[in-house]
Amino acid sequence: MVTGYDEIGKNIADLKASPNINDYKSEVASWSWENIWNELDTPNGLINQAHECIDRHADGDRAQKLAMIWNSSNGIVEEYTFADLKKETNIVANAFRKAGINKGDRVFFLSDRIPELYFGVFGTLKLGAIAAPLFSAFGPEPIKERVQRADGKVIVTTPKLLAKVNEIRSELPSLESVIVIDTRDDEPIADEDLAWSELCEGMSENFTIESTGAEDWSIMHFTSGTTGLPKGAAHVHNTVVSHYATGKYVLDFQEDDIYWCTADPGWVTGTSYGMFAPWSNGVTQVIDEGGFGANRWYEIIQKFNVTVWYTAPTAIRLLMKAGAERARRYDLSTLRYVMSVGEPLNPEGVVWGLEAFDLPIHDNWWQTETGAIMIANYPILPIRPGSMGKPFPGVYPAIIDDEGTEIEEPMVEGQLAVRPGWPSMFRTYWNDQERYDSRFKNGWYLTGDKAKKDADGYFWFVGRDDDVINTAGHLVSPFEVESALIEHQAVAEAGVIGKPDDLAMEVVKAFITLNENFDESPELLRDINNHCRTRLGPAVAPRDIEVIEILPKTRSGKIMRRLLKARELGLPEGDTSTLEDD
Ligand code: ATP
Ligand code: MG
C-alpha cells in the first residue's frame, strides 16, 4: 500500500514507561501460553474469569485498590475497589442462584453502562452461567432474534428498557424470567418481573465460585453485523488467558495505570477490553455511562488522569473533525498510550495522534470470534501508519490463497487466516455449528478479511472479503481509497464500494461526508477527485464521488459498506439490526 507516511520510529528512552515487551523478537521466540496460565490463579486446573478478574485481587494485595471509577452520564462518580467488586458480585451470584440461574444457562443483559451491568456479568460468570450482553439501544426485534437464537433463560434489564422486552416476551418460549435493575430509577416494573433490589436483599456477601474448567462456556457475543446477520460467537473461561496476556503486552498495563476503554459491552471490545483484560491485570479502569462528545471525552481523560486509552477509528475520525486544537485545550498529559480497534485505522488517524496528543495511535486487529487481539502495534515497535502491526506472540496469522496454502511472498493479497489454538478462540457459533465448521480450512481459521504481509512481518488490511473491489482487473482495497479521501481537508469520512459495470466489472464509487466549513460544489468534487488520482492513480481513484449527510454505521461504529451498496443499487438492505440510529 502506498501510504505516503513515514515509519514512526520508537526509542525506548522516549516512552513514558518501560514497556512490558522490550524485545518483540525474543518474546515471540520464547513464548509459552503455559507460562501465562501459570501467572494466573488456577487451583487444580480450574479457571474462572470472575476469579481471575476480581476475587484473586480482592483476596490479595489489591483488595483496597480501585477497580472501577464509574462516571455517570450526569456527572456522578462512584468508586469501587476490588474488594467492593468481590462483595457486589457475590451478592448478585447468590441472588441469581435464588432466581434459578444455573451453570450453562444463557443470561442476557440489556442495560446502559451502569455498575450493576458489571456486577451482573461477573455474578453470572461466578455461577458458571453464560453472560450475553446486548447493546441497550437495540430495538425489540434484534433483542428477540438474539435471545431466541441462544435460548436465553433470563434477561437482565432496567426499568427504562423494559418496555422493549415486554413487546417480545410472548415470542420467547425459553425465557423464564426478567430481572429489572430497579436501584437507579424508580419507574414501576411489571408484576411478573423480579426486582434486582428485592433479589439482592439479605443475600450473603460470600459465594463459592462454581467449578469451571478452561473449556466451560463463559460469554457469548453477537458479531457486529457489518457483513450480514450477526452470529453468536461463544467463548469459554480459558479466554481470559488471552485477555490477560494481551492486556499486559499490547495494552501494556502498568500497576498505576488509569485505563479507559470507550467500547460498550454490547460489542466484544467492551467486555474483552472493558472488563476482562484490565481487571485480570488488576488495573483501575474508568467506565463512562455517557456517549461520544469531543469535549466530554477530553474532559474525562483530564478529570480522571487517564493513562491508557482504547478507542475506535470512528471516534478518532470524529475527534479529527473537531480539530487537534480542541484536544490541545485540555491537559491530556497523563496519556501514555492510545490504541484503536474495530475498523482499519487510516494512516492519517495514526499520525493525527501526534498532533493532538503527542502520541501516535496504535492500531490492532481482532474479531468477536478471536476473542482477543491477534495482530498489534506495540509500544516498542516502530509504527508503519496504515498497518495493523505484527502478530501477538503465540499467535500465528498468515496470508493464504484460495486452496488454503500460505503465501510466503511479501505484499501479495490473500485471505487473512489464523492457526487455531490460541486460548480465546471462539468454540462455536451458538446453534449454528455448520457455520462454525465452514470457517476452517486446511488447518486454518478463516477470518473473512483480506490482507497482505510485508517483508518485515507487518500485516496490512485490504478489506473484508465481500468489500474488495474488482475494477478492470485491479483488486482495489476500499480502505486504501477511503484513506486517500480523508486526507483531503474537506473530507471527514468516506465509504467506498464497487458498483457493477458492464465494461470494468466494477467501478469504484465513494460516499463522503464533509468537514464543517465545506460546502459541496463541482469544484470541490473535482479537487477531491484530483487528489485521489494523484495519490492512487486513475485506475483506483473513485469514478464517482457522492456527498451524503452521514455514513451508515453499526452501533460499534463500523461503516456498513453493504448498506451503501444496497442503497445505491436499490437492493434489499438485509439485516439492519445493528445499524446505528440516524
Ligand atoms: P459481522 O461478522 O457480523 O459482519 P464484524 O465482522 O464487523 O461483523 P466484529 O467481530 O465486531 O464483527 O469485527 C471484526 C472485524 O472488524 C474484522 O474481521 C475486521 O474486518 C474489522 N476490524 C477490526 N479491527 C480492525 C483493524 N484494526 N483493521 C482492519 N479491520 C479491522
Ligand atoms: Mg465478522
Image: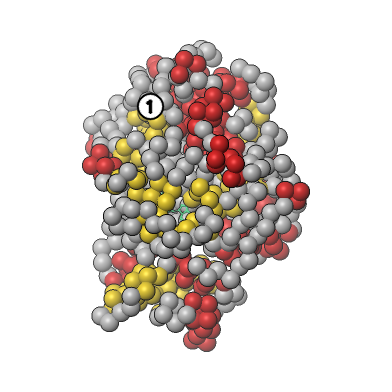
Total labels drawn = 1
Estimate the x, y position of residue 368 in percent, counting from the top left.
41, 44
Residue 185 visible in the picture? no
Looking at the image, residue 550 sits to the left or right of residue 401; the answer is right
The kind of secondary structure element at disc 1 is loop
Looking at the image, residue 381 sits to the left or right of residue 209; the answer is right
Q: Residues within 10 Å of mark 1 (few under 14, many from 20)?
A: some
Residue at 34% of width from left, 24% of height from top?
104
Q: Quadrant of the C terminus?
A: bottom left
Mark 1 — residue? Answer: 215
Estimate the x, y position of residue 377 in percent, counting from the top left.
58, 51
| Placement of 289 over or under 549, stated as above or below | above
Residue at 59% of width from left, 65% of height from top?
348
Q: Nearer the viewer, residue 356 or 401?
A: 401
Residue 414 visible in the picture? yes
CB of residue at label 1: within 8 Å of ligand 1? Answer: no
Q: Residue furthest bottom?
A: 523
At label 1, which amino acid type do we have?
Glu
| Placement of 291 over or under 548, stated as above or below | above
Q: Nearer the viewer, residue 211 or 317?
A: 211
Estimate the x, y position of residue 70 in percent, counting from the top left.
61, 36
Residue at 33% of width from left, 53% of height from top?
405
Q: Nearer the viewer, residue 315 or 384?
A: 384
Looking at the image, residue 464 sits to the left or right of residue 206; the answer is left
| Placement of 46 over or under 484, stated as above or below | above
Q: Nearer the viewer, residue 23 or 178?
A: 23
Looking at the image, residue 122 sits to the left or right of residue 380; the answer is left
Q: How is the image coloured?
A: secondary structure
Residue at 58% of width from left, 71% of height from top?
4
Estimate the x, y position of residue 48 in percent, counting from the top left.
46, 23
